[in-house]
Amino acid sequence: MKVPILDILCPERCVLCGQWIQEETRRGDYPLCKGCKSLFRSTEEQRCKVCSMELTSEEGICMECRGRSFSFERNVSLFPYRAHVKEAILAYKSNGFQRLGLFFAELLLPLWEEYFPRLPLLPVPPRPEGLKVRGFDPVGLICRELSRLGPVQVVPLLGRSKGTKEQKLLSKQQREENLKKAFFMKQEILERFFTEGKVPPSVVLLDDVFTTGATLNRCAEVLKGAGVQEVYGLTLARD
C-alpha cells in the first residue's frame, strides 16, 4: 500500500493517544488513529428512556427523572460522557479540532435514522460570547455535516440572547435561572423552511452534552410555546 505523500511530509498525531497517525487515516480526515476510532462503539447498557442516563438497578426510567417533568419527550445520547468520549468532545470544542465534527456526525446519523427519521433537526444555538471565542459553532458544524451525509433537514430555528453565563459553571438551579430568557424563535427561518410559516408538529434538538437537561428543556418550552407538539433531544453524550 502506498503511503500518501502528505502523511510523509505533514504527519500528525492522534488527538486522544498522541500516536502518529499512519496511512490508515489520511490527512484531511478526522485526527484520530485507527485504534482510538475503534473505541467509539455503541454499547448495550440499559439507559433511562427519558434522559439516557445509564441504569444500574432501575428499569425504564432513572430515579431522577421519576421525580421531574420535562417539556421535551425524551433525550437520546450516543455515549456516556467519560474517558475517550469526553476527551474527544473537549478537543473538538475547546482545542479547535473542527474535523472531529464529521466524525461525530457519522456516529450520530444512525441514531437519528433509528429514533427520529424524517424529523427536522434543530441545533441548540451557542452562546454568542462562546462563539466569538471559539470562532465556530460546534453543534452547528455537526448539523451541517449530518445534512451532507444523509437526508437530514437542518433548521436553525432558535436564536440565543447575549449575556447568559456558561452552563457548566453553574448549579442545577442556577442553570435553569440562567436560561429563562436565553432562547427565541427566528421567524424568518420559520417562514423560509415551512409552509405558511407554520411550525412542524415534531422536531429534534441537537446538542453536544446532556447534563441536567436545563438547556433542552428551555428550548422545548420556547418551541412548544410557538405550537410545536413534540420535542426530542439528540446528544453526543450523557454526563
Image: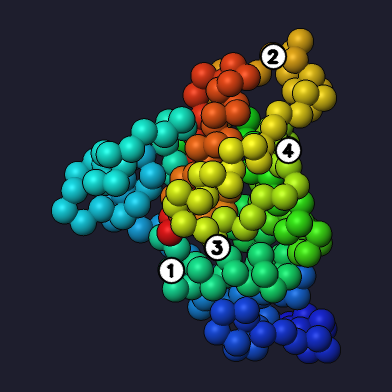
* Residue corresponding to mark 3: 169
Q: Nearer the viewer, residue 118 or 63?
A: 63
Q: Is residue 230 left or right of residue 89?
A: left
Q: CA distance from mark 2 to mark 1?
A: 40 Å
Q: Residue furthest left?
A: 57
* Residue matched to label 1: 82
| Image spot of residue 195 (x, y percent) | 74, 13
Q: Foreground: 215 or 236?
A: 215
The residue where tag 2 is placed is 198
Give amino acid for label 2: Lys
Q: Depth-wise, is mark 4 or mark 2 nearer the camera? A: 4
Q: Mark 3 to mark 2: distance in Å?
A: 36 Å
Residue located at (52% from left, 58% from top): 170
Separation of marks 1 and 3 at Cα, in angstroms: 18 Å
- x then y, percent, for residue 28: 77, 70
Q: Nearer the viewer, mark 1 or mark 4?
A: 4
Which residue appears at 71% of the width and 42% of the height? 160
- Residue 153: give its label: none
Q: What is the distance, in whole Å, between disc 4 and disc 3 at their CAs? A: 21 Å
Q: Kindly identify which residue carries mark 4.
A: 159
Mark 3 surroundings within 10 Å by alpha-carbon count, few (fewer than 14), some (14 through 19), many (20 or more): few
